[in-house]
Every structure is written in C-alpha cells, then in structure tokens.
Amino acid sequence: MGSTEETVGSKDTREVIMEATFRALSEHGYSDLRMRDIGEEMELTRQVIHYHFDGKRDLMSSFLEYVAEQYEGAIDVEEYDDPRAELEARIEQCLFGPGFDEFGHWERMKVYHELFAHAQNDEEHQAILDEHYDAIKDSIVRVVEDGIEAGVFRDVDAERMGQFITDAIHVGRERRLSLGHDDAPEETQAAIEAFVLDSLYVDDESGPA
Amino acid sequence: MGSTEETVGSKDTREVIMEATFRALSEHGYSDLRMRDIGEEMELTRQVIHYHFDGKRDLMSSFLEYVAEQYEGAIDVEEYDDPRAELEARIEQCLFGPGFDEFGHWERMKVYHELFAHAQNDEEHQAILDEHYDAIKDSIVRVVEDGIEAGVFRDVDAERMGQFITDAIHVGRERRLSLGHDDAPEETQAAIEAFVLDSLYVDDESGPA
C-alpha cells in the first residue's frame, strides 16, 4: 500500500477516498464508522485521508456533496416535449435510481438516508442536504410549471406540488430501507399516480367526476 | 445516587430508565450515546440499567417500544361521527403531536426519526418500528374505509390511501427535523388537503371539475 499514492492526481485521490468512504459506510453504518475503516477500503495509505480532510465530520461533508452531485447529475433526464412524460420519468428515476445496477442506487440511498437522519445534529451537513433536496424539488416544480403553462396540468400551486411529490419519493425510498418494505417505491409510484397526478392532469378521463 | 433504588418498583424503574434514555438521546444523539450518559440522567445507580438490559441495543429495543406505545396511546383520538373530521384530526395529531407542550412532541420525534434511520442496520429495531408504523397506518386506513362506507369519500383503494397519508405525515416531520424546515408540517398538512383530501371527498365543491 502507499506505493500508488504518487501516481494519482488529486481529483482521482478524492474519487478514491469517496468511493472507499461509500464502501465503509455501507458496511459499518455512520455511527460505527472509524477513519481506519475507510483506510481499509482503499489502496492508498490512510495518511492521504488525514492530509485531505480534517476528521470524520469534514470527510462526511465532502462525501455528502459528492453523493449529491453524483445523484443530481445522474437523474438529469433528457428534455421531454410532454410535461407529463417528463414528470413521470423524474419520479421513476428518483424512486428507482438512474441506470439501476451500475449506479448501485439502493446502496447509495442507504448511506444517504442514514446521513439525512444525522443532519438533525449537524448544521453543516443539514445545509448540504438542504441544497440537494431543494435542487431535486426545483426540478419537479419546473416540470409542474411547464405543464400548467402548456395547459396540460391544472393550475395548482406548483411549489407546493413539487415539494409534496419530492417528499413522497423520499419517504417511499426510506420505507423500503428502514422498514424493509420492498414494494414501497412501487407502491409510492402507484399512489402518486392515483391520488396526485390523477387530479393534476387536465383531461385525464379516469379522474374524479 | 443509588439511595432511591429500593424505593421504586420495577414499573417505575423502567419508566425512570426510559425517560433518562430519552434525555440522553436528545442530548447526545444515537451514535455518540454511551450507557454512562444514560446513567448520568437519572438518580438510580447505573447498575440498575445493566441489571435490566443486556447492553445498548437491548435497551434501545425497549426504548423504541416505550416510545411507540406512548405515541400510539397519545394519538388515540376521540370517536368522531364524521369520517372527514376524524381523518383531519388524526393527520393533525400525527403531524403536530397530541398535547404539544406536555408531550414534548418534537423532542420525541427527533429521537424517533434518528432511530428510524438506524433501523436499516438492525432487524430487531426494524420489526418494532414496522409494527408501530403499521398501527398508525391502520388507524388511517380504517377512517378511510369508514368514509367510503358512509358515502362521504370516493371509492379509493383505502389501504393505498392510508399508507400514502401516513408516509406524507412521516416525511413532513422528518423534513422539519433533518432539514430545519420549520413550516414543513404545516406545508404537508396544506398539501394533503389540496392534493389528496380534495379528490377524496365526494362533494367537495373546490374539487376538480
């Protein structure tokens, strides 16, 4: 170990540390995580971590930013002409993950949701998560606004609607992770369709009379 | 310390330990909690904890059951004749807490939501939380069924609707706690009313045309 240290640039080093952090968190969980667990998940010496980060909290802040960037980048869906199709695609990607296997959606979400709970006690982590959650929410609000403008969605409070759908996605994933309800994301998707989108869509014939 | 030990019965002892656990968790968070922190929050000797519980995980399992019982008991609303009024009362109680001040709703919810995230890594805690979450969900499903039967709610999938509302309540609280969105419970209540209840109620004139 340590011999590869000189051969990687600092961008690669960050990536290596972040991926090692991800594996260590998946294995040990946040509360039991020690810096040495991360060191054991990578080929670089543990000193590299201490050189780049000022302790566990600082490392975790960078890790949260890394996960958020990766997630937001990955769910950036292609441009749709149809706001309905785009809204449904975004809901599906947030619930089930973009590029499912390759992205390791649930492994990553497990870590994300654990850190989400910890943010109660950490203002810096809270600020990072808040910005991320807001970015996802804004992307949904924008589609709702597009749909209202195009006349295919009813004239609802787009901000409130985007927040509500983002929240529903969040808890659908969380219920799968924390309670072991494997069908929670599918159930959430069906509930959003039946109870929310159904009354959002202007000319949906299955809507309430 | 220790001198009061003989004077309390085992039921009181459990209560004393549980309330000390609650205070210690509020102060330190789950990951940093040590048994000694709980000992420092009570007048009994720390040995009493070790006598009753086989370590931190075992104590936490009992604590989860204690919190769940307390919560379920407290939100048991009076019998309503009107399913709409009962549904709205249940949503309000779950979001804002029954008897707000006295119950210390947010302090308790903070601990509850942190343990909820940890349940990812603990099957025993998961089972306890699952049972509790299900009890809350069932109480909402029942009201929805009552409303359908009474003809005041549309004929929706009551199970799916009850789950969706329970999930929305959960994440409304969580967003307040984890992201510091103080208005999240109020916003969630307004969103449930505007987007879900509005299309659930049969003769609501503000409903979609």
Image (cartoon, coloured by chain):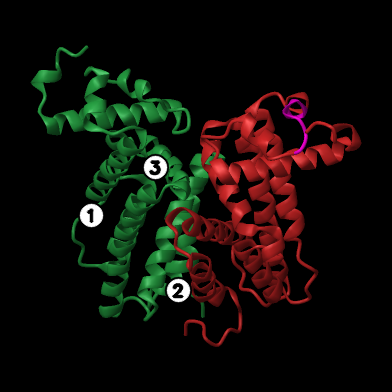
Chain colours: A red, B green
Share a chain, discs 3 and 1? yes
- What amino acid is labelled 3 in the image? Tyr
Chain under callout 2? B
Residue at the image position 20 percent from the left and 32 percent from the top: B15
Please tell me which of labels 3 and 1 falls first in the chain. Answer: 1
Residue labelled with disc 3: B112
User: Looking at the picture, how far across and down is residue B192, in whole percent?
Assistant: 46, 61
Horizontal arrangement in the rendering, residue A97 relative to residue B51 (left or right): right
Please tell me which of labels 3 and 2 falls first in the chain. Answer: 3
Count of number-bearing discs: 3
Bounds of the magenta span? A43-49
Alpha carbon of mark 3 to alpha carbon of mark 1: how far?
21 Å
Residue labelled with disc 1: B77
Residue at the image position 61 percent from the left and 65 percent from the top: A96
Mark 1–mark 2 contact, CB under 8 Å? no
Classify mark 2: residues with Cα within 10 Å, few (<14), some (14-19) or many (20+).
many
Residue labelled with disc 2: B199
